[in-house]
Amino acid sequence: MKHLIPTLLLTLFISCSKDTPPDTSENNCNKILEALDYNPSGNPTYQTTATLTYDSEGKLKTVIARGLNKSEYIYYNDSIVLKAKDINGVDIGQVYYLNNQHRITRTKFANEEYKYDANGYLISYKQPYGNNGQIFGYTQYFLTWQNGNLTSVFTNDPNVSRKKITFQYYNLPNQNLLGYNSPFYDGSILYDRNSFFLLDGLYFGKQSKDLLKSSNLNDINQSGDIIYQSDSNGRIIDLAGFYKFKYQCP
């Protein structure tokens, strides 16, 4: 999957008709039903990258993508079981283990040690590294928050080139687009789609309250401002020209 927040300089265009985001609570028809990504050589130009369904409680149930790529989420009090295959049908299933606040602390294959503060924000985690499914070690990352927004992700590991990533925000309420516009993804906290789809359920803690604007790598390379376009109901339907979203209700 290509990187979701482009590093090209982009001209800002936001068309929001409301100061508050639309209600996306349980059983609400404003939940995203389909995500499409830009494919300039395809016909049509935008092609479905994920079709989603939800259970009776409004939790994400299934994600169906191209090829044999399909994911199913099963929720328990202390864990989330992911049954999934990639585009070639290879099993990529996972188990996420939850604490008493129903936040993810580790996974079946690695002890990432996701840690949260008293306010429910993720403040540190260990990212595994290795080869061919074998974990050789972990890189420790730390997160800083200010006024309800994630402002930086950093590590002191001398072997890591991306030691610090900082984030800027618009003065607009955030809309969680299944994680596609999350600093958690752009900051490499979560690096697979099946995980960042869970951001909307707060399983990785509270998310930034404002809409992500740009990111800055090692205080040197800053991305262009992210372009969002919204419909007449204030729902974001286009992310930087790379992704479009369709909702359960018109």
Image: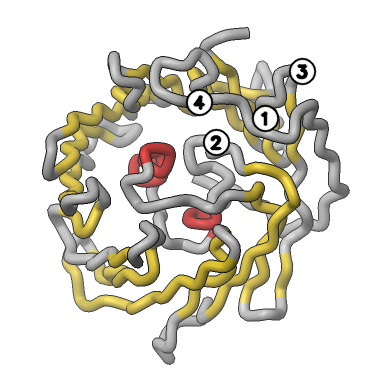
How far separated are the C-alphas under marks 4 and 3? 16 Å
Quadrant of the rendered image containing residue 65: top left
How far separated are the C-alphas under marks 1 and 4? 12 Å
The residue indicated by pointer 1 is 236
The percent coordinates of residue 241 (x first, y second) are 73, 36
Q: Secondary structure at mark 4?
A: loop
Q: Secondary structure at mark 1?
A: strand
Q: State which mark lies toward you, 4 or 2.
A: 4
The percent coordinates of residue 190 (x first, y second) are 40, 55
How far separated are the C-alphas under marks 1 and 2? 8 Å
The residue indicated by pointer 2 is 177
How far separated are the C-alphas under marks 4 and 2? 11 Å
Q: Secondary structure at mark 2?
A: loop
Residue visible at 25% across and 27% down?
72
Disc with the residue nearer the chain's start (4 vs 2): 4
For the residues bearing labels 1 and 2, Cβ distance under 8 angstroms: yes
Residue visible at 29% across and 23% down?
61
Q: State which mark lies toward you, 1 or 4.
A: 4
The residue indicated by pointer 4 is 24
